[in-house]
Amino acid sequence: MRTNQFSWNGKAWTNTNGTVPDPDFKADLTFIFGQRMILEQGDAYAAYTKDFTSGQVVIGTTSGNIMGLEVSDNDLVATAVQFDKTKVETHLFHVGAKGSLELGEAIGTKFNANSEAPKLIYIVSDGHSVNGSELVIGIANVLGSTVPVAGGLAGDDARFESTLVGLNAAPGKGNIVAIGFFGDSLEVGCGTRTGWEPFGPERIITRSEKNVLYEIDGKSALKLYKSYLGDRAAELPGSALLFPLEITLADTGERVIRTILSVSEENQSMTFAGNIPEGSKVQLMKANFDKLIDGAADAAGISKRGFSNEPELALLVSCVGRKLILGPRTEEEIEEAAAVLGANTTIAGFYSYGEIAPIGTGDICQLHNQSMTITSLRET
């Protein structure tokens, strides 16, 4: 496996030492992550495809870009991968008449039709119009836990206005890209950790519809949030990232974290990136800086368990809420993860509106919020 990383300077793509990329490098797969307003201009994608015509190009808007040990905002970054033995298969899906659950089932069915099962399915999804919980449930309905599924929901800084995803074309709204990796020589590992701490009383969700929350303990959930936010209530939905919800699912007992995408004063409701089932127990959470950073290191360690050597590529997807909380310390979680992964591991990724990964080895994929998820890859 070979990798090459580039950044967009407004006119051209240059690699990390500032020179024009080597045209002889033939990528099988490229991830382009970056700010929505820059990608909407279209120049960067056109320039990339002009210089590099080989391979599949997956594009997603973000709430921050990860390349190497750096986190950046107002730019675009690209990570190109050339595999030695691994085959890559990509598919584009669009939110239309189908709901998120049906789209997930369509993704699972597409890869289930192959004679060879993929070693990994990686998802880059619209983060504004897709219910991430329903999407991963749909995939699991078809594939179960036989194939690890990872990835994330595209971001839009902390604006929550619009997200864009594309495959071999300029990105658009409502798109989902699914990437299948095939080959016995590919080692794959996934890790996820949070680092948030629950506080306050445990409550019960008494009224919700999928990912829309109305009432907790029979009272307005929005009013409850505003009481904790105080003066920052006027900054909703972004300020709600300071207090995510930890949900204990009534049917399985599993714990997941959920954060807000939007609020409706008219309906007194909050829309989350994933489902908020009625009857589930819920607690507010608060940040502990050191535990957030330690969580990133733990996720890295889990992702490389059983590897024959250090990973060659690690795809990091962390939550915009973690970035807002950590502020100037954001790069510390990347640095801690990198120290565990290894000095020769190429690091790429983005800050998201939702993270996708199995909780443990052999588990069905889940949608996470406020988490660091790491997908490690190595060819043997």
Image (tube, rainbow, N blue to C red):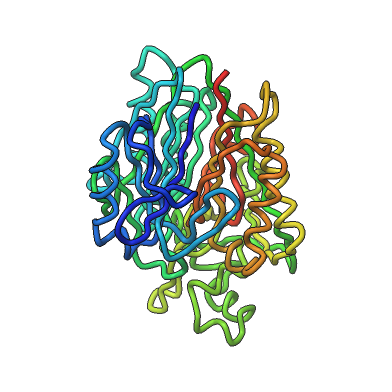
In the image, is residue 176 above or below residue 264? Answer: above
Judge left or right: residue 183 versus residue 243.
left
At horizontal 58% and vertical 36% (from top left) the residue drawn is: 358
- Between 169 and 199, which is closer to the camera in this rendering? 169
Residue situated furthest top in the rendering? 115
At horizontal 66% and vertical 45% (from top left) the residue drawn is: 338
Q: How many marks?
A: 0
Query: In which quadrant of the rendered view does residue 345 lie?
Result: top right
At horizontal 39% and vertical 29% (from top left) the residue drawn is: 108
Residue situated furthest front in the rendering? 19
Q: Is residue 155 visible?
A: yes
At which x and y percent is residue 220?
A: 54, 74
At horizontal 24% and vertical 56% (from top left) the residue drawn is: 42
- Between 343 and 325, which is closer to the camera in this rendering? 343
Query: In which quadrant of the rendered view does residue 157 lie?
Result: bottom left
Judge left or right: residue 257 versus residue 80.
right
Which image quarter is the C terminus in? Answer: top right
- Between 305 and 112, which is closer to the camera in this rendering? 305
- Between 137 and 163, which is closer to the camera in this rendering? 163
In the image, is residue 274 above or below residue 5? Answer: below
At which x and y percent is residue 114?
A: 35, 17
Q: Is residue 217 visible?
A: no
Judge left or right: residue 213 versus residue 106.
right
At which x and y percent is residue 161?
A: 36, 67
Residue situated furthest bottom in the rendering? 231
At which x and y percent is residue 318?
A: 56, 53
